[in-house]
Amino acid sequence: MDSLLVFVPKITNRLRYTFDVVLSQLLGLKYDITTDIVRFELRAEAKFVYGTQAIGSHPFIKSSGLLFEREIQSQELKVSDYNGIKVFFPVFDRKSMLPYDIFSAAFYLVSRYEEYLPFVADVHGRFEATSSCLHQHGILRQPVVNLWSRQFAAVLTASFPSLTTTFPTYNYLPTYDIDAAWAYLHKGLYRTLGGFARDITQFDFQELKQRWEVISGQKNDPFDSFEFQLRLQKKYKLHPKYFILFAEYGFNDKNINTRNPAFQQLIKHLADYAEVGIHPSYGSFQNKAKLRSEIKNLSAVLNQEVTQSRQHFLRLRLPITYQHLIDLDITDDYSMGYASQPGFRAGIANSFLFYDLDHDVPTNLMIHPITLMDGTLRDYMKQDVDEAISTTQELNATVRAVGGTFVTLWHNESLSDEKRWKGWRSVYEKIIEMSV
């Protein structure tokens, strides 16, 4: 037997969405929801009540009420501990199978409810890791929604031993952001001359020498690590995704001119071996017209529809960023993570559909959380190569334990094995070895 009947006082979009995530996606259960008490009472198989009060002696999860609301309002986020795991939305009812409302807690995190409430943005307009309830309670590196779901599975199967739950299986997905395809090549006359002038005025003769050696063909461009990436793909049988910054030049958007033939050829070459998506520019943040142009132009180069994206600088503002992506036919986004900290921004190690809290409806935009980024380790956390490997091992083991997808975000620049990235190429291969 692998189906459930759930009695609820009323059916809402929030409730159905959360049951899909917890019961269907994370526990592999078929379920049905009813408000018909007669139907519920006549059911002899697995069932439970979800609401504010129990019904007879039937298994019961007490609701805190969040899933029966429609508005967005400040929540008094209380925290308790259950079997060694911190939980949100504790409830106090001896009849409840769990001492917390697992469904409200899961919805609060996966919908990113807290990001709709007032917060202090960082210099890039982002919701920062330090503002998150998970970071503040020291559990950002725990996929608590997965862990809570397993706690619920344990009490549920204790009541119904014939009920079979099926957890997701572990997967590894390497992804790359191409912010600057080359360090020196194909920059155009003015940017190249400007680079030489800057090296001279700053008396950076080592940079001046390297720039000249690359441009004159004596040395490979340090950012050109693409063949190394392709070798890794073949060696480890990887199926990565690339996100290309394909935009007008700007202060934080410094890739190659989109009309450059070498750049376009590189994109087509990468698309022969991997899936390619858009890396919406810093300048397109909350600018739908600019985003539409970037997607259209990349699509023309690839000669195919672009349906996948990841925000440059992970510059994500809910719900407008995702609403724009949906309007422009993006089906999958890989921006759900923090630049400053690794872990689980939405408290979950698996993909999930975006729930638009503004309109109180689920959408068809699939969100793929990222677990770890190169710049997080090196630039924000100031970790050396050994510390980075240790952090990765810890996170990878965590994701494996819950059957999640371990998503790494790397850049071609960080595989240059030069300057501040000296030694990090070997770090990356070690990360792949432990992740596959």
Image: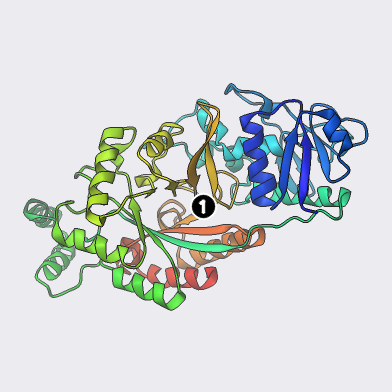
Task: Kindly give the residue lying farthest to the bottom in the view shown.
Answer: 235
- Drawn side of residue 181 relative to residue 11, left or right: left
Seen from the viewer's position, the closer of residues 358 and 93 is 358
Picture coordinates of residue 431 (x, y %)? 49, 68
Where 144 sits versus 212, above or below? above
Residue 266 versus residue 243 in the image, above or below: below
Per the image, label 1 sits on a secondary structure element best described as loop
Q: What's under tag 1, amino acid-wise?
A: Pro
| Residue 28 in picture, x, y percent from top left | 69, 53
Residue ID at (62%, 32%)? 14
Left or right: 209 in relation to 107:
left
Image spot of residue 155 (x, y percent)? 83, 48
Residue 131, given in percent of the width and then of the height, sits at 53, 36
Report the residue marked by disc 1.
342
The answer to whether any part of residue 280 appears in the image is yes
- Residue 223 appears anywhere in the view: no
Q: How many marks?
A: 1
Q: Residue at x 22, y 54 (%)?
A: 301
